[in-house]
C-alpha cells in the first residue's frame, strides 16, 4: 500500500464521523450518534459517499451512513462531509457482508447501492451486492418493506438483479433501463452523480436504475 493511502487509513481512525471495527451504536445510531430520532438511510459501496452527502443536503431530516471497505475513499468522503458541515452523514468501514453487526432489526429505512462492482464471473456471483445472499443480510436490519435503490452502469448486474427480484418475489417499484434517456436523473435520482458515474458517462455507458422492496419475514 502506498504512503498516501496509509496516512488516510490512520486518519480515519481519529475522525468522529467514521466507524471501523466498532458497532457500539448498534440499535441506537439515531439517538447516540446523530442525537435525533430521524430515519437512517445507507449508501452501500459508497466510495466517497456522493449519494450519502448529496441526499443529506436535500433531506436534512434524515441521517445517512456510507459503507465501504476502502479506507482511502471513505477518508475523502468523511473529510468532504465535515467541510460541507453535514452533521447528518457518517461512514462505516466494513465488509457489507457483516453489516448486520452494526444495525438492529428494523433500524434502517432505505438502502442505496451505487455503482457496485458487478463481479461478472459466475464463480463470483455471491459477491454481487444484489445477490440473494446479500438480500438476506439487508433483511436483517431493513424496516418492513424498506426500499433498495440500485444505480449501475453494468447491464449484466442490472439484468441479474431483476432476475433475483423475480425469483425472490420482491415488489419491483421502479425500473429505468436508461436513466438519462428517460429523463429520470433530475427527478427520481435527485440529480446526484457519483465519481464512478461521471467516468461511465464520459465513456458513453448507459446508466440503469432499479428500486425494489424487501419484505421482512
Ligand atoms: C466502483 S466503486 C463505486 C464507488 C462509488 N459508489 C461511486 O459510484 O463512485 C465500488 C465500491 O464498492 C466497494 N465494495 C464492493 N463490494 C463491497 C463489500 N462487500 N463490502 C464493502 N465494500 C464493497 C468497493 O470497495 C468500491 O469502493
Image: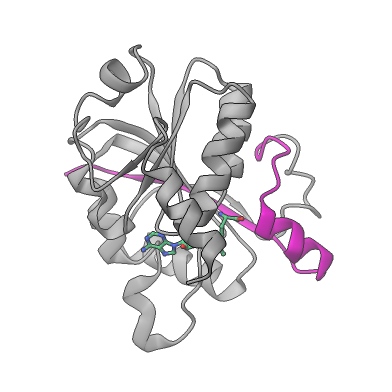
In the foreground, 194 or 212 = 194
Q: Is residue 21 above or below residue 60?
A: below
- Taking the spot 32% from the left edge, 37% from the top edge, the residue there is 145
Q: Position of residue 2 (x, y in %)?
A: 53, 70
Query: Can residue 140 be seen at all in this image of the molecule?
Result: no
Front in this rendered view, residue 49 or 108: 49
Which corner quadrant holds the C terminus? top left
Residue shown at 68%/35% (left/top)? Answer: 190
Colour scheme in use: one colour
Q: Where is residue 46? Give x, y as percent.
A: 51, 50
Q: Quadrant of residue 166?
A: bottom left
- Residue 6 position, x and y percent, is 46, 60
Which residue extends farthest top?
Answer: 36
Q: Horizontal and vertical percent for residue 121?
A: 45, 87
Residue 25 relative to residue 190: left or right: left
Q: Report which quarter residue 143 is drawn in.
A: top left
The residue sitting at 52% across, 38% down in the picture is: 78
> How many badges with numbers are in the image?
0
- Residue 207 in magenta stretch: yes
State whether residue 41 is above or below residue 122.
above
Residue 122 visible in the displayed image:
yes
Side of 93 relative to 22 (left or right): right
What segment is highlighted magenta in the picture? Answer: 188-217
Query: Residue 194: within the magenta?
Result: yes
Nearest the eye: 106 or 88: 88
Q: From the viewer's perspective, is 40 left or right of 157? A: left
Residue at horizontal 61 percent and vertical 43 percent from the top: 50
Amino acid at each position: 500500500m502506498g504512503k498516501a493511502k496509509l496516512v488516510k487509513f490512520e486518519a480515519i481512525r481519529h475522525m468522529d464521523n467514521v466507524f471501523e471495527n466498532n458497532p457500539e451504536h448498534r440499535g441506537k445510531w439515531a439517538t447516540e450518534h446523530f442525537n435525533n430520532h430521524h430515519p437512517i438511510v445507507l449508501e452501500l459501496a459508497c466510495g466517497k459517499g456522493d449519494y450519502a452527502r448529496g441526499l443529506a443536503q436535500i433531506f436534512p431530516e434524515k441521517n445517512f451512513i456510507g459503507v465501504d471497505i476502502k479506507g482511502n475513499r471513505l477518508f475523502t468522503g468523511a473529510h468532504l462531509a465535515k467541510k460541507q458541515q453535514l452533521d447528518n452523514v457518517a461512514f462505516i468501514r466494513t465488509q457489507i457482508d457483516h453489516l448486520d453487526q452494526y444495525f438492529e432489526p428494523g433500524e434502517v429505512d432505505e438502502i442505496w447501492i451505487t455503482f457496485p462492482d458487478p463481479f461478472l464471473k459466475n464463480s463470483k456471483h455471491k459477491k454481487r451486492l444484489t445477490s440473494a445472499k446479500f438480500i438476506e443480510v439487508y433483511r436483517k436490519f431493513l424496516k418492513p418493506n424498506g426500499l433498495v435503490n440500485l444505480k449501475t452502469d453494468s447491464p449484466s448486474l442490472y439484468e441479474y438483479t431483476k432476475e433475483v427480484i423475480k425469483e425472490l418475489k420482491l415488489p419491483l417499484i421502479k425500473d429505468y433501463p436508461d436513466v438519462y434517456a428517460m429523463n429520470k436523473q433530475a427527478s427520481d435520482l435527485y440529480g446526484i452523480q457519483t465519481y464512478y458515474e461521471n467516468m461511465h458517462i464520459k465513456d458513453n455507458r448507459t446508466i440503469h436504475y432499479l428500486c425494489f422492496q424487501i419484505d421482512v419475514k
